[in-house]
Amino acid sequence: MSRTVSLTARTAFNAETTGEVPVFLITVDHDDLATPFRFSSDPTTRLSVDPLSYGTVSLGVTYNFLPIGMVMPDDSDEAPPAFRITIDNVAREMVPLLRSVDTPATVTIEMVLASDPDTIEVSWPEFDLIQADYDAQSVIIDLAIDSLVTEPYPFGRFSPSGFGGLF
């Protein structure tokens, strides 16, 4: 599956060394949350001095920095895309969030460059948070898209065993 990205991003991705930093912006949304929980993979700018916090501002929306690791989905036709995000549990904000909801949250992931956070290079919208495990050090979140897209169509077959009256 091909993706259209800017010339700056393609040059940075193909360069042997570069000063460009890809930044992942993650939005966790749920009907039970007053406001979506937004966090960034990079401390792009200083957001406040007291308390000291860093994050990324993209298109006027503030994303707080949390150290994360990410396994991105394959571009495969055989299986639905799935993410695995590991978040360092330093701020202790995610555990109360995960405990507060009883139905799957919706997660949107966008990638921007730190030099141009207002240009979204790649977007993965509307993933479902299907599993979350946590301990004192980290929170591991598994995301997937509804697997109905991989179901065969049409579901039923008009065969003598299922629809004898037709034959």
Image: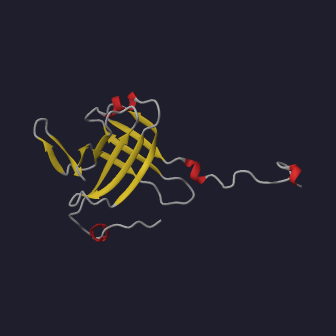
Decide: is 141 above or below 11.
above
Q: Quadrant of the C terminus?
A: bottom right
Counting from the top left corner in percent of width and height, residue 27 is at 34, 44
Q: Residue at x 76, y 53 (%)?
A: 157
Q: Quadrant of residue 17?
A: bottom left
Decide: is 116 above or below 55.
below
Q: Which residue, as the protein is rendered here, is positioned at the far front?
A: 166
Task: Determine whether, in the image, residue 134 is placed left or right of residue 93.
Answer: right
Q: Residue at x 30, y 36 (%)?
A: 89
70 or 112: nearer the viewer? 112
93 or 157: nearer the viewer? 157
Q: Quadrant of residue 123?
A: bottom left
Task: Determine whether, in the image, residue 113 is placed left or right of residue 98.
Answer: left
Counting from the top left corner in percent of width and height, residue 120 is at 31, 59
Q: Quadrant of residue 10?
A: bottom left
Decide: is 158 above or below 90.
below
Counting from the top left corner in percent of width and height, residue 139 is at 36, 37
